[in-house]
Image (tube, rainbow, N blue to C red):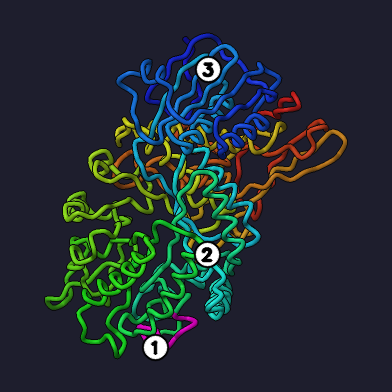
Amino acid sequence: MPEMENMFFEFRYVKTSGNPFCISQDSAVVSDTECYASEYVKVVLKECGFAGKKMKIRLLVGMPERVKTVVGKAFSEDDEAYAIEIAQDDVILSAITEKGLIYAVSTLKQLIESGNVCEMLLFDYPDKKVRGYRVFIPGKENFDDFKRMVDLLVYYKYNAIMIEVGGAMEYKRHPEINTEWVEFCREVHQSPNEAKRIQKETYSWKKNSIHADNGGGSFITQTELRNLIAYCRERGLEVIPEVPTLSHCDYIVRAHRELNERCEDMYPDTYCPSNPKTYELVFDIIDEICDVFKPRYVNIGHDELYTLGKCPLCKGKDPVDLYVGDIVKISDYLKKKNVRTIIWSEKLLDNLYFPGPGDEMHGYGGTGDEAWDIPRLAECAGKVPKDVILLHWYWSLCSGDAERELLDMGYDMFFGNFQVLSLKDYRERSQNIPGGFVSNWGSFEEQYMQRNGQNFNVISTAYVFWSGAYDFDKSRDVMQKVKDELYARYKKSLGKSIIELTHTTDYFKPYTWFYDGIYIVPEDWLIGHHEVVYTDGTKADLPIIYGYNIRSSSETETSDSGSEEARTTSYIEVLGASYPEMKNGRMFYRTAYKNPYPEKIIKHIYVKPKNGIKIEARYDAVEGSGENV
């Protein structure tokens, strides 16, 4: 019985026999239902099939009794469970629901790509019911990037996507929102540091997380957004709109400054919850968003609140009443539409406060920064309606006891902004939490997806959310699996002819997140190139991009603080376009490039650093032309 080599996921049950073989792209597909999975499997055969064995691939909704009998104790009636049976000339993909069939096809694709197709019975179902990804609306020029990201979610068997709307969707009732949103984003994108200046250096009070990447700094039409939503839903993803309210409301109060909670703020982000006109506008916005999304859930935000009780109508009122009252008004409105409310919930945590000079308690703002101007809101816990779902993104900044207090009150909770390999007591703390959302606060363009750790977080979380055995003691093994997976995906994306090499540098540049209006300036990161010289005199330059396919030789795999398994963000940044390897105490970065002229013979490759930067390089191989370098 052959081993399941090179497979990323592990499975609840798998039994194989015989030798591996290839499935022909001319194999017949038969389905007992019209669903996306039947089209998906045809795409898989076209992309991955070879001149192999012609099979009859059947898709069945409903789990055959023979599968239940053979799988035995490992079997579950989970509504996302699926099975793959391969025997003689048949491949049978079966699932309890149509959604499960999509996971079966994704797994078949993984089997084909890894060379593990043989006679088998494979059965699996997820450990977590909520496996989601939180994103912005793409700009018009990034629709293809968005769809590639959705296809990545399908491949790794996610089932939900949360899309922040903000000012990035066309508002037919309030076009002034879109007009002001575009102008605001134009201001923020004047330089890569403008958002930081606004947030940290403009006022005595702090701000956090300007979402100027939403809509690519502009907005898309409702028709365009409906098409993207349909693309997601067809592929089995629950689509949840995020509608920032109370906080992160720059898109609202920039266009309607009369509703601003802090009158002197030229960059307002919070509306007045005491003004009835606020809700006339908010409900108009919600109406249009619900009409476009037709959702079952809406996330209404309420995170990172830095301003409350400041305007003439709110001054002197209890901040708890203001905060809870706003949630109640909006959740009651959504209930009338049969929509359930989600909020970001860090304000409800009781241990995230610090004392002021008197007896008053102040709250923390974004990721752990003290914000003296924020009132204590932990008393909102228990007063917020219990049918509101809590999206818990402070899991890394609070104890398990703090989140258990909210769970014991009867709230449903999902993890948010999830980076699963960083949660030390994952199995214990996730016991009563049915999953969560990885979050992307930036662009879908591939270099951003890699350097912001998005590809890493999506893939590692997929593994954990499907595994019934993962806990933190396995994080090192999962880290290695993800590292291998990312580099294999990258090399495959380059095509058949590649130039592979290993390089490193003594140059160092601090890690940067490309979020909140901070964007990549290519010339700031290009530290040189590899000059390829072909025998006929043709030359080609292969870019050496710091933070993308190379970092410093002094980097390590582990964090300077905390657990030995906690990886640095800078190490994760280069995973994909490079494969970091420690040798003799120094980090080297194996990387690959698409061969610009695969039909030509390479004579030499030279390293050409910029500005005297020292770069070491070793040229490993040219694949696809049969020539070693």
Q: Quadrant of residue 540?
A: top right
Q: Is residue 259 magenta?
A: yes
Residue 581 visible in the current orientation: no
- Residue found at x 38% / y 73%: 207
Per the image, label 1 sits on a secondary structure element best described as loop
Residue 214 has which mark? 2
- Residue found at x 38% / y 81%: 278
Q: With 598 as the anchor, is 488 left or right in this view?
A: left
Per the image, label 2 sits on a secondary structure element best described as helix
* Residue 158 coordinates in the image, percent (x, y): 45, 42
What residue span does the magenta drawing correspond to?
Answer: 253-262
| Amino acid at circle 2 | Asn
Placement of 279 over or under 392, stated as above or below:
below
| Amino acid at circle 1 | Glu
Residue 518 visible in the current orientation: yes
Q: Quadrant of residue 248?
A: bottom left
Which residue is the site of mark 3? 86
Mark 1 Cα shell of 10 Å, populated few (<14), some (14-19), many (≥20): few
Q: Is residue 94 magenta?
A: no
Mark 2 Cα shell of 10 Å, populated few (<14), some (14-19), many (≥20): many
- Residue found at x 48% / y 16%: 120
Disc 3 from disc 2: Cα separation: 45 Å
- Residue found at x 40% / y 46%: 568
Residue 264 has which mark? 1
* Residue 551 coordinates in the image, percent (x, y): 53, 46
Per the image, label 3 sits on a secondary structure element best described as strand
The answer to which of marks 3 and 1 sits earlier in the sequence is 3
Placement of 502 over or under 412, stated as above or below:
above
**Of the pair 140 and 197, the residue shown nearer to us:** 140
